[in-house]
């Protein structure tokens, strides 16, 4: 795809997104929904990161326990 066509499509997509979220009648609701979804996803990612950290700490603990028992 030529760069001019790509730039045109990017500009059209940006304009459509701006029109969608800046709509005077429904834009406020759409922005609020987007904000709520982003907040929810961030919370889920934080929860998953905390879980993975706890699992890694547990594995490390078990490994240290196994190595010290083998001595």
Image: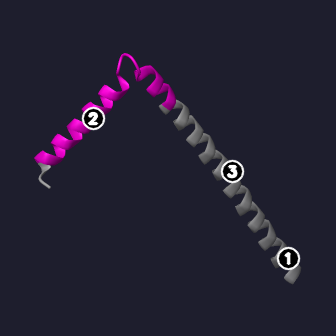
Q: Which residue is mark 1?
A: 68
* Residue at disc 3, secondary structure: helix
Category of crowding for the residue at label 1, using alpha-carbon neighbours closer than 10 angstroms: few (below 14), some (14–19), many (at least 20)? few
Nearer mark to the viewer, of 2 and 1: 2
Task: Give the secondary structure at mark 1.
Answer: helix
Left or right: residue 2 versus residue 16 is: left
Is 59 placed above or below 5 here? below
Residue 66 included in the magenta stretch of the image: no
Other residues around mark 3 within 10 Å, as few (<14) / some (14–19) / many (≥20) = few
Q: Position of residue 54 (x, y in %)?
A: 73, 56
Residue located farthest toward the top when viewing the structure as drawn = 24
Q: Nearer the viewer, residue 63 or 28?
A: 28
Look at mark 3 in the image and give the residue it sits on: 50
Colour mapping: one colour
Residue at 21 percent of width and 36 percent of height: 12
Residue found at x 11% / y 53%? 2
- Residue at disc 2, secondary structure: helix
The answer to which of marks 2 and 3 sits earlier in the sequence is: 2
Instruction: Tell me if residue 40 comes above or below residue 21 in the rendering.
Output: below
Q: Can see residue 71?
A: no
Outermost front residue: 25
Q: Residue at x 84, y 72 (%)?
A: 65
Q: Which residue is mark 2?
A: 14
Q: Is residue 52 above or below residue 41?
A: below
In the image, residue 17 lies at what x, y percent? 32, 32
Along the viewing direction, whichever of 46 and 11 lies nearer the viewer: 11
**What are the residue bounds of the magenta stretch?**
4-33
Label 2: few (<14), some (14–19) or many (≥20) C-alpha neighbours in 10 Å = few
Image marks 2 and 1: residues in contact by CB distance under 8 Å: no
Kindly report the distance in space between the C-alpha atoms of the residues bearing marks 3 and 1: 27 Å
> Can you tell which of label 3 and label 1 is closer to the viewer?
3
């Amino acid at each position: 795809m030529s760069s001019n066509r790509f730039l045109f499509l990017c500009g059209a997509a940006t304009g459509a997104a701006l029109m969608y979220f800046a709509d005077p009648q429904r834009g406020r609701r759409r922005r609020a929904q987007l904000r709520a979804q982003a907040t929810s996803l961030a919370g889920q990612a934080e929860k998953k990161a905390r879980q993975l950290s706890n699992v890694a700490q547990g594995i490390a603990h078990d490994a240290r326990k196994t190595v010290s028992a083998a001595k």
